[in-house]
Each structure stands twice: as C-alpha cells, then as structure tokens.
C-alpha cells in the first residue's frame, strides 16, 4: 500500500533536505528544453554518513549537489549502460556519488509514470527519485516543482517531506521559462549526436 | 541530415529572421513574421514560442493585409498557443476560425485538440468520433484519438488504436515511429521490434532505424551478434557523427564471447579521436569508461 509506505517514510525522514541550486536549475532547464518529451537524468551528491549513536531508524535524505541530464526519450539498454558508465566515471573523478534520478513525464499528469520508468528505478534501490510535477510549472512559489519518491524495501513511494529549494532558486527556475534554455543545457543523448555538446558541465549559467 | 540537426538549423534561421523583424519598420516586420510562420510550417519545426509571437503580432494589426492567408495564420497560431498552454489565445483563434468555417471538419479537429489541451478527454473523443462519423477515412481524427489515449496515460488503448490505423495506412513512417516509442514506454518490446522492422522496410537508407533495431536486439534478446550487424549497417549509412553506433559496437563486443581485441582497440581509437576539440573534462570520463 503506497500511502502507508509514504507515512512510514515521512516518520523516518528527519528533515527536509536541500537541493543545490545548480542541480535544481539543470533539471528544470532540461525539462523546459524538451517540453513534449519524457526527460530523465541522474542526481549527484553525497549520501549522508550514519553516525554510530544516531537512531538507526531515522534516515537522512542524501544531499543533492548536481544533476546530469541523460535522455529526452525512453531509451533502450545500450545507451543507458554507456551513460551510466560514463556518469560513474565522472563521479569518481569529481569525488561524488549518484544518489538518485529525476524524471519529467511527457504527459500533463506527471504522476502516471509508464512502466519503463519503473524498470529504470529498479536499478536505483535505496536512492531518491524526483518526479517533476508538470502542472506546477509556471507557478511562482505556491507548489514545489518536484515530488520526492524514496525506495524502501524495493517499493517506491512518495514522501511529503522531501527536497526543497530556496526561494531564490525557485525564482530563477521560473525565469527560465522565458529565457532561451536551448543553449544552456545539453543531455547525453544530444552529446551522442554532437560530441562537442557538454553534458557534464559542472555549473549552470541561468542568465 | 539527422532530424535533430535540421531542427537546430531551422531554429537558428528563425532566430535570425526574428532579430531582423525587431529592427525593421512595421510593414516590413509583418512580411518577416509571415515568412517565419510559413517557414516553420514548411520545415515541420516545433517552435511554439516564436510562432505564437509572430502569429499574435500579425493577428493584432495585419489581418486585412493578410487577406485569405489569415486563416492559415490563425490555425498555426492556435497550434502554437496549445503548445505554450495559452488557452485564451487558442480559444480566440478557434472562435474566429469557427465563424468563417462553421461546418469544417478541419476546424472541428482543432476544437478537439483544444479539449485535449484542457485534459477534457471525453469531449475530445466525442469531437473526433463525430468527425469519423461524417468522414470514416479521416486519418487526422484517427491519429488524434491515439493522442487522446496517450494523453490520458492509457498506453494500451493508444497502441491498439494506432495499430488499427497502421493496418489501413501502413506507409506512415511517423506513425510507426510513434508506435515504437509507445511500445517501448510500456515494455512491449515485441511490438517495438515489429514497428522497427516496418520502419527499416519503409526507409532502409535511414541510419536511425537500423540503430534503433540494434538497440532493441541488445535490450530484449541480448543477441549481441545480430545487434552488432545492425550497428555496423548504421555506421555504413552514416560513418561520421554516429557516436551512438560506435558506443553500441563497443558494448556488443564487450558482451559477446569473441570480443575481438583488435577491432575493440580500433573502435576505441576512433572514438577517442572524435573527442579531439571537445571540452577537456569529457575525455577522461570517456576513456575510463571504455578501458574498464
């Protein structure tokens, strides 16, 4: 029962985790660049260290510091494998970890994720998934753009106390709607068509 | 030229025209905005922000000057407004079109599309069914019905409807592509492979179809030998800028029993040489993933 799992998870998560401005803006820009396609990418950061004297039942959400945009289609195994291999290399070089995925549905109702997304997530047990809420794009501060989903015992459920971005980041994200994002963000799939497109750019210039 | 690259060129050309329009006086600007609309329509480019901007500009003060072309502009502005979720402008365009063409099935299809944009699936289906009652061979209405089911998230029905459409019109490449994407989304790889095979038969010179088939074979049957052949075919059709095939071949060689070290090394060299001139931090990423 997904709802029950959600309440369980809400209890065990200590506090709202913060998502870095770069990661947030990159994910939003990726979604805005391909509004009619399903987008997916990786969340990069660091998993929290468990202290010995900390209550083992409490979990901290990993800190998200960056995002790597991967695809703007429901991709198949080979390119997904290659993307994961390269992403893992990049993480090793930059001393960070893959802590989750983000996904933006091509449908207006983002909560109806197709089965292929479930397959994608099954490789990311014990990680976080951020699902983009398409109905909230364009709203300034009323609702968050991402729903947080956590995996517990191989079941994914939504959590209310998830990731929050600060107001300045949200403002920048909204202003991305009017700006030209096409040149600011590239994903792995575009990189495959033109290797000069940098999908691993560490920073995001929102101006 | 791949579709992605073409779209980029179109976008660039349109941006140039827009900048020119901003600098010109009103009458010249009108001409340029009209060119933008016809050019994007010709190239099947999806640039809703720009088309909406140009369309709104023309519809505000250039209706008389456009003459009968105003209806094309209204239609294109309507479609762009739907993409931008500007339902108000879309509604206004539709009202004007309905007034001029009250019995038109083409306009009726547009009102169905407006229902879709509002997520009013039942009324959208009703609109398309009405069109099909009057004109049972109206392919646009059939395709829009597929879009309604997809929009609802009902991929199974969408696939069923699209398959019955393709039984009638089996040469519609875009429809087969859509079927391929829909079936991959619901993990119906059997349907995906069938659609891909049809695409290869319809357009054997298109490197993307062979590429996708190679990827499907890799994903489903784990048939690395056959997948390799299709990747090689794709490379033959497009030897340059076909990184996806090169990577695919690398993965196939890794996973098959006869991994052919000479060929592998040659492939790695070819990939690394393509990376010359790219941002520096990409090179070690690629290199370490290939030489694991």
Image: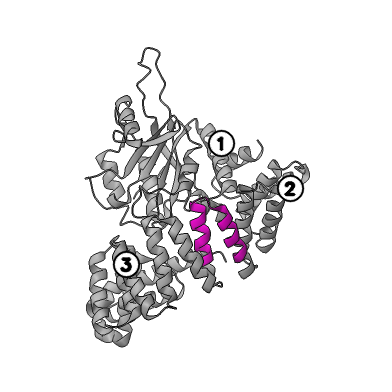
The answer to which image quadrant residue B19 occupies is bottom left
- Residue hosting label 3: B124
Q: Secondary structure at mark 1?
A: helix
Q: Percent x, y for residue B120? A: 28, 62
Q: Say few, some or many: other residues with alpha carbon within 10 Å of mark 1 (under 14 / 14 to 19 / 20 or more).
A: many
Residue stretch rendered in magenta on the structure:
B175-199
Name the residue tied to disc 1: A89
Q: Nearer the viewer, residue B142 or B5?
A: B142
**Residue at left offset 32%, top offset 32%:** A4
The answer for which chain carries disc 1 is: A
**Closer to the N terminus: mark 3 or mark 2?**
3
In depth, the one of A137 and B7 nearer the eye is A137
User: Mark 3 and mark 1: span between their CA atoms?
Assistant: 48 Å
Q: Residues under labels 3 and 2: Cα distance?
A: 55 Å
- Where residue B126 appears, as percent x and y from the top left, is 31, 69
Question: Judging from the image, what secondary structure is the residue with disc 2 in?
Answer: helix
**Most common secondary structure along the magenta stretch:** helix
Residues at marks 2 and 1, CA–CA distance in whole angstroms: 22 Å
Q: Which mark is residue B266?
A: 2
Mark 3: few, some, or many residues within 10 Å (few <14, many ≥20)?
Answer: many
Task: Categorize mark 2 by other alpha carbons within 10 Å: few (<14), some (14-19), many (20+).
Answer: few
Q: Is residue B2 above or below residue B100?
A: above
Q: Is residue B124 above or below residue B100?
A: above
Question: Which label was assigned to residue A23?
Answer: none
**Residue B67 quadrant:** bottom left
């Amino acid at each position: 029962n997904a709802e029950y799992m959600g309440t369980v998870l809400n209890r065990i998560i200590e506090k709202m985790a913060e998502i870095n401005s770069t990661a947030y803006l990159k994910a939003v820009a990726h979604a805005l660049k391909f509004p009619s396609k399903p987008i997916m990418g990786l969340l990069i950061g660091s998993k929290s260290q468990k202290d010995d004297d900390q209550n083992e039942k409490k979990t901290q959400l990993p800190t998200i510091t960056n995002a790597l945009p991967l695809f703007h289609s429901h991709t198949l195994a080979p390119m997904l494998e290659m993307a994961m291999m390269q992403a893992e290399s990049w993480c090793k070089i930059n001393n960070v970890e893959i802590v989750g995925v983000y996904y933006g549905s091509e449908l207006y109702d983002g909560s109806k994720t197709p089965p292929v997304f479930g397959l994608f997530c099954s490789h990311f047990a014990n990680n976080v998934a951020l699902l983009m809420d398409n109905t909230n794009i364009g709203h300034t501060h009323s609702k968050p753009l991402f729903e947080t989903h956590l995996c517990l015992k191989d079941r994914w459920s939504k959590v209310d106390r998830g990731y929050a971005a600060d107001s300045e980041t949200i403002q920048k994200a909204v202003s991305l709607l009017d700006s030209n994002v096409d040149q600011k963000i590239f994903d792995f799939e575009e990189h495959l068509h033109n290797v000069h497109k940098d999908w691993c750019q560490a920073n995001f210039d929102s101006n | 030229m791949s579709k992605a690259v073409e779209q980029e060129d179109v976008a660039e050309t349109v941006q140039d025209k827009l900048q020119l329009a901003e600098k010109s006086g009103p009458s010249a600007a009108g001409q340029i905005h009209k060119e933008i609309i016809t050019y994007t329509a010709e190239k099947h480019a999806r640039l809703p922000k720009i088309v909406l901007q140009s369309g709104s500009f023309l519809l505000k003060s250039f209706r008389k000057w456009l003459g009968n072309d105003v209806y094309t502009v209204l239609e294109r502005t309507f479609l762009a407004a739907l993409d931008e979720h500007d339902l108000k402008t879309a509604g206004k365009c539709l009202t004007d079109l309905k007034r001029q063409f009250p019995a038109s099935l083409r306009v009726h299809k547009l009102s169905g599309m407006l229902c879709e944009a509002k997520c009013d699936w039942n009324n959208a289906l009703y609109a398309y069914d009405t069109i099909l009652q009057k004109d049972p061979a109206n392919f646009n209405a059939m395709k829009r019905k597929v879009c309604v089911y997809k929009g609802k998230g009902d991929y199974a029905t969408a696939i069923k409807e699209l398959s019955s459409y393709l039984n009638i019109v089996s040469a519609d490449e875009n429809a087969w592509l859509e079927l391929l994407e829909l079936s991959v989304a619901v993990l119906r790889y059997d349907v995906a492979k069938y659609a891909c095979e049809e695409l290869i038969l319809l357009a054997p010179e298109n490197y993307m179809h062979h590429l996708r088939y190679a990827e499907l074979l890799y994903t489903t049957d784990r048939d690395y030998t056959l997948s390799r052949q299709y990747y090689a075919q794709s490379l033959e059709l497009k030897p340059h800028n076909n990184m996806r095939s090169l990577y695919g071949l690398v993965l196939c060689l890794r996973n098959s029993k006869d991994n052919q070290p000479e060929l592998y090394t040659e492939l790695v060299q070819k990939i690394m040489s393509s990376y010359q001139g790219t941002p520096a931090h990409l090179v070690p990423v690629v290199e370490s993933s290939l030489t694991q």
